[in-house]
Amino acid sequence: MPILARFLKDRGIVTERQLEEAIQHQVLYGGRLGTSLYELGFITEERLQEALGRVHGVPTTAVDLREVQQEAVALVPKVLAAKHKVFPYRIRGKTLDLLMVDPQDHATVAKVGYSIGYIVRPLVVPEFRMIQLLKDYYGVDERWRFSDTHRPAAPAAAPLEALAPESAAARIESATTRDEVVEALLALCARTFRRVVFFIVREPWVIGWSGAGEGMDRALASSLRIPLDQPSVFQTVTRDKTVFVGRFGPEEENQRFLKAVGKRPTTNAALFPLAVKGRVVNLVYGDAGATGNVKANLGDLMVDVQKVPRAYLRIIRRRIAETRKAAGVAPEGAEDGED
């Protein structure tokens, strides 16, 4: 949100360098800018909430879990709360105080009010607070925090899984969002593997995000979560930043993963890291199906895979430039994209 960035910078709440780090964090891990600023320790929840209220022109409130009314929660179905990222906080007469990540979403305000027969009073809260509330009261998986908020609403023009390797590589280089990079990467890997899983690395977890191929889809991929504080191939590849091709060992986390994806333990698979500025941000798993073995030589694929970190850096540079322009800051030299 360029307006939020400008508000925070103009008032000296965050520095330009902190904004740039937050933008990089946002490109790699999704979510809203305020979430990245908070997770990086650059802003407190109170200051962020106050800024969001000023930017959106709506009231804010410090969420007190003791004031959450169960009768209010019962009014809004889980599917509605999860889809629109809203949380019914409390009822005052015929007015429902509705916590929202985007209080400018007037269609959602009207939909909630119409469906429950209450006047809705929108209150803005930071995204990370909404994540906690939806998880604690509705059981909504917090994985949506990693959604790419810059992803266009329109679907891709062509099915990515049908792309030739050259077209997939070109799509990586022209992508404008992280999710477009991921989709093109999955298509690129299809020439080498029968199925692929893309992971986001967020210490202390490796979190499944998307997948494609034989018996693999995004739903199965997103159910995967591997701890990095336990011995596994995932831990080794993340720590050593090396490509692994072989059989997964007998460690508990390895075997749990193989069982989850239906992979025969006596066959091999590949796991490789994607690093940005020396830090592993993603892992990619590929195999030759439940009972097949992958080729030991992944040289050609690894050459094309290096387009992914470069695409991330290009998107980061573009977002930083857009934010500077919106904030009325003169563009700097090429240093923002340097490794």
Image (cartoon, rainbow, N blue to C red):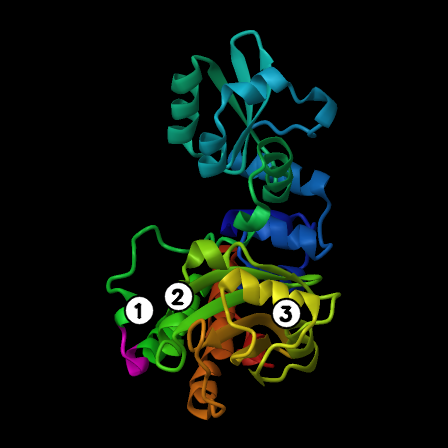
- Residue 1 % position (x, y): 51, 50
Q: Assess disc 1: are there few (<14), some (14-19) or many (≥20) residues with their C-alpha within 10 Å of its C-alpha.
A: some
Residue under circle 1?
A: 161
Residue under circle 3?
A: 254
Q: Nearer the viewer, residue 99 or 332?
A: 99
Q: In terms of secondary structure, what is the magenta stretch mainly?
A: helix
Question: Disc 3 or 1, which lies upstream in sequence?
Answer: 1
Mark 2 to mark 3 CA distance (whole Å):
20 Å
Q: Quadrant of the C terminus?
A: bottom right
Residue at image coords 27%, 74%? 163
Q: Assess disc 2: are there few (<14), some (14-19) or many (≥20) residues with their C-alpha within 10 Å of its C-alpha.
A: many
| Amino acid at dot 2 | Ala
Q: Nearer the viewer, residue 140 or 309?
A: 140
Q: Which element is circle 1 on? A: helix
Mark 2 to mark 1 CA distance (whole Å):
8 Å
Mark yes or no: residue 276 visible: yes
Q: Nearer the viewer, residue 118 or 123?
A: 118
Residue at image coords 48%, 26%? 77
Q: Assess disc 3: are there few (<14), some (14-19) or many (≥20) residues with their C-alpha within 10 Å of its C-alpha.
A: some
| Amino acid at dot 1 | Glu
Q: Are marks 3 and 1 in contact (CB under 8 Å)?
A: no
Q: Are marks 2 and 1 in contact (CB under 8 Å)?
A: yes
Q: Which element is circle 3 on? A: helix
Q: Which residues are magenta?
A: 163-167
Q: Taking 31 as reference, is 41 left or right?
A: right
- Residue 57 % position (x, y): 53, 32
Residue under circle 2?
A: 212
- Residue 127 % position (x, y): 58, 43
Q: Nearer the viewer, residue 253 or 117?
A: 253
Q: Taking 203 as reference, is 119 left or right?
A: left
